[in-house]
Amino acid sequence: MSVVGIGVDIIEVARIRASLERHGERFHARICTPAEAEYCTRMRDPAPFFAARFAAKEAVSKALGTGIGAACGWLDIEVRRKASGEPFIVLHGAGAETTKRLGISQVLVSLSHTEHYACAQAVAVGEST
Ligand SMILES: CC(C)(COP(=O)(O)OP(=O)(O)OC[C@H]1O[C@@H](n2cnc3c(N)ncnc32)[C@H](O)[C@@H]1OP(=O)(O)O)[C@@H](O)C(=O)NCCC(=O)NCCS
């Protein structure tokens, strides 16, 4: 296993809260998969949870070296949770194609959020040494 790329992101929860208030479901449908949105909206205060997923997607896009765009869109990166609560990344569509092209077999992620900030770190790993 080898490290192919790393990425980190931090975001102010207030920015995401404002977008959620202004655009509601249109905002989270553009950024989050239905399962991600369902998880976040279940929370008493969804904004930090949406912010953490936003940060995770930007961190993953940095680990890939692509940013968010044609090579890897918002909805190509999905944050899922194990029963333990540990997050993991599933890539879809163009994002999955890009990771394949780059020889990335897995993207590891870690999230953290407070009332005001959310951050995420991603590590893209490949099979080769
Ligand atoms: C790559 C991306 C995720 C950077 O995020 P950002 O919020 O603009 O900026 P951040 O402060 O988090 O990160 C900036 C750092 O990302 C790094 N970076 C930029 N492009 C990168 C790339 N292709 N790969 C890896 N890292 C990259 C740089 O180190 C940069 O710092 P620098 O300018 O001092 O060198 C961003 O360009 C992107 O694709 N954002 C999504 C755009 C979008 O649709 N926004 C709308 C929000 S609804």
Image (cartoon, helix red, strand yellow):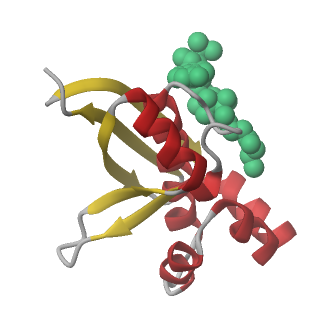
The reply, left or right, for residue 113 in relation to residue 94 is left
Q: Check the picture and name the quadrant holding the C terminus.
A: top left
As displayed, is residue 6 above or below residue 71?
above
Q: Is residue 59 visible?
A: no
Ligand 1 quadrant assignment? top right
Q: Outermost residue, right direction?
A: 22
Q: Position of residue 81 (x, y in %)?
A: 31, 70
The reply, left or right, for residue 36 in relation to residue 123 is right
As displayed, is residue 32 above or below residue 91?
below
Q: Position of residue 90 (x, y in %)?
A: 40, 58
The residue drawn where x is 71% and y is 52% is 15
Q: Position of residue 25 (x, y in %)?
A: 76, 77
The residue drawn where x is 33% and y is 35% is 104
Q: Position of residue 1 (x, y in %)?
A: 13, 31
The residue drawn where x is 24% and y is 25% is 3
As displayed, is residue 50 above or below residue 40?
above
Q: Nearer the viewer, residue 117 or 64?
A: 64
The residue drawn where x is 67% and y is 60% is 31
Q: Nearer the viewer, residue 29 or 42?
A: 29
As displayed, is residue 88 above or below residue 67?
below
Q: Is residue 80 visible?
A: yes
